[in-house]
Amino acid sequence: MNKRYDRHYFDRWYRKGGIGGRQRLARKVALAVATAEYHLERPLRSVLDVGCGEGAWRAPLLALRPKARYLGFDSSEYAIARYGHRRNLRFARFGDFAQLRPCAPVDLLVCSDVMHYLDARELARGLPGLADLCGGVAFLETFAREDETEGDEHDYRARPGSFYRRRFEALGFRALGSHCWLSPVLAGQAMALELPT
């Protein structure tokens, strides 16, 4: 049976289950925005959210940066049908980013709570597209085998953190900490002590 990202799923895990809640999401958004602006040395202008679900990042992001352009992609037909027009969400699977280039490289690329549910082939297909589409900072919130997690365990792939780290770094991303990665475009500009060893 395939996993369905329908209304029941979002009700269960995001509204009734309250994974993290609004304030936790607002802190994540603020962290990602501040990190991107610090490294870009200017206000954030554009955000691409891959695996955006119902576009939960959009409201707290626009509360901080009302002029920022937000574009989200998700494989949930329900989320796109219900919120696509209103929240600027479009349909795509992660693997579609092997070829999909819907915009110029963005200041902030978000892929939150997605990659640990993907099989290795789809992950490998889509990741190079994320590197191409990130011109500033990527917030790649991904959970690993070493983490104690709560929530949806259906199709969860408990891979070691090194699995993701190797793949991100092979594409030119540089770790900044707290799920933030400097884009290949900016990676060479970071100071030694801005990057973890």
Image (cartoon, grey):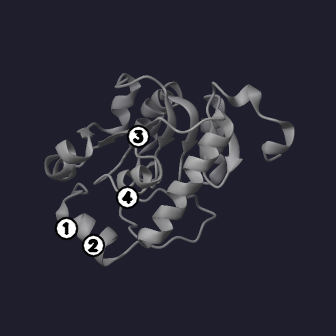
Question: Which residue position is annotated with label 2?
Answer: 12
Q: Which residue is mark 1?
A: 8
Task: Give the residue pinned by disc 3.
Answer: 67
Please tell me which of labels 3 and 4 falls first in the chain: 3
Mark 1 is surrounded, within 10 Å at the Cα level, by few (under 14), some (14 to 19) or many (20 or more) other residues, namely: few
Q: In the image, which is nearer the foreground, mark 2 or mark 4?
A: 2
Label 4 element class: loop
Residue at image x 28%, y 54%? 54
- In the rendered structure, the answer to whether residue 157 lies left or right of residue 83 reads right
Residue 106 image label: none
Q: Residue furthest left?
A: 81
Whole-Å distance between the Cαs marked 2 and 4? 16 Å
Q: CA distance from mark 3 to mark 1?
A: 33 Å
The quadrant holding residue 195 is top right
Q: Residue at x 41, y 47 (%)?
A: 118
Query: Which residue is more in the foreground, 113 or 33?
Result: 33
The answer to whether the residue labelled 3 contacts the one labelled 4, judged by CB atoms less than 8 Å apart, is no
Looking at the rendered structure, the kind of residue marked 2 is Arg
Q: Secondary structure at mark 3?
A: loop
Mark 3 → mark 4, Cα distance in angstroms:
37 Å
Alpha carbon distance from label 2 to label 1: 6 Å
Q: Are marks 2 and 1 in contact (CB under 8 Å)?
A: yes
Q: Residues within 10 Å of mark 2 (few under 14, many from 20)?
A: some
The amino acid type, in three-letter code, at marker 3 is Lys
> Upstream in the sequence, badge 2 or badge 3?
2
Residue 26 visible in the picture: yes
Q: Amino acid at mark 1?
A: His
